[in-house]
Image: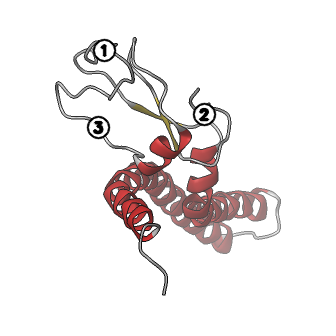
Amino acid sequence: MADDFRGHGDLPLEFRRPPGWPTPTREWVAFHQGWVPPAGWLPPVSGSGHCPPAPTGWVFWSKDAIGWPALAERFTAPVKRSLAYGIAFIVGAVVLTFGGIVAGVEAQIVFWFGLLWGGVQSARALLRLRRVDAQLMDAVIATGPLQRRRGYEEYLASFEPTT
């Protein structure tokens, strides 16, 4: 019986097997993160059975509910801090101006500068958050072949005679 890799949460992507396909092992999923089989490819099936081809347009991978956020946190944390600073700057400008702490011309300068700088900072951070997610998915898919090659090299090395 194949490993049930669901719920482990240490892999960023979860394999969505097409109907009728066997459940791959956890090792296979770990080494093939983001790999999309070519059209017509069928997984090897033990015995005399066979499985149907994947439906046209089938999405083979989805973000794991635990593994993806754990991976993404390292890349999104600085962007979230930048967003928090932008929002804090806007709130600070509003409090200083409407709280009566700064008055007159200075109040207008503080208010508009805080609103503009905080707004730009927040907008840039939100755009970067959206890009980080897409770039991270591309990186996971791009490193898949490297992981497979490493795994294969480790496998081959296990057969090398020791001297």
Amino acid found under the numbered disc labelled 1:
His
Q: Earlier in the sequence, mark 1 or mark 3?
A: 3
**Residue furthest toward the left?**
39
Element marked by disc 1: loop
Q: Nearer the viewer, mark 2 or mark 3?
A: 2
Q: Residue at x 55, y 40 (%)?
A: 26
Element marked by disc 2: loop
> What's the mark number on residue 3?
2
Query: From mark 2 to mark 3, how far is it between C-alphas?
Result: 21 Å
| Residue 48 locus on image (x, y percent) | 33, 14
What crowding class fits label 3: few (fewer than 14 Cα within 10 Å), some (14-19), or many (20 or more)?
A: few
| Residue 15 locus on image (x, y percent) | 46, 32
Element marked by disc 3: loop
Quarter holding the N terminus is top right
Tell which of 52 and 84 is nearer to you: 52
Q: Which residue is mark 3?
A: 36
What crowding class fits label 1: few (fewer than 14 Cα within 10 Å), some (14-19), or many (20 or more)?
A: some
Query: From mark 1 to mark 3, how far is it between C-alphas?
Result: 19 Å
| Residue 151 locus on image (x, y percent) | 42, 60
Q: Residue at x 73, y 63 (%)?
A: 92
Amino acid found under the numbered disc labelled 3:
Val
Q: Earlier in the sequence, mark 2 or mark 3?
A: 2
Q: Which residue is mark 1?
A: 50
Amino acid found under the numbered disc labelled 2:
Asp
Q: Residue at x 65, y 64 (%)?
A: 81
Q: Nearer the viewer, mark 2 or mark 1?
A: 1
Tell which of 141 and 84 is nearer to you: 141
Q: Is residue 47 left or right of residue 83?
A: left
Q: Residue at x 17, y 28 (%)?
A: 39
Q: Earlier in the sequence, mark 2 or mark 1?
A: 2
Is the residue 103 above or below the residue 145 in the image?
below
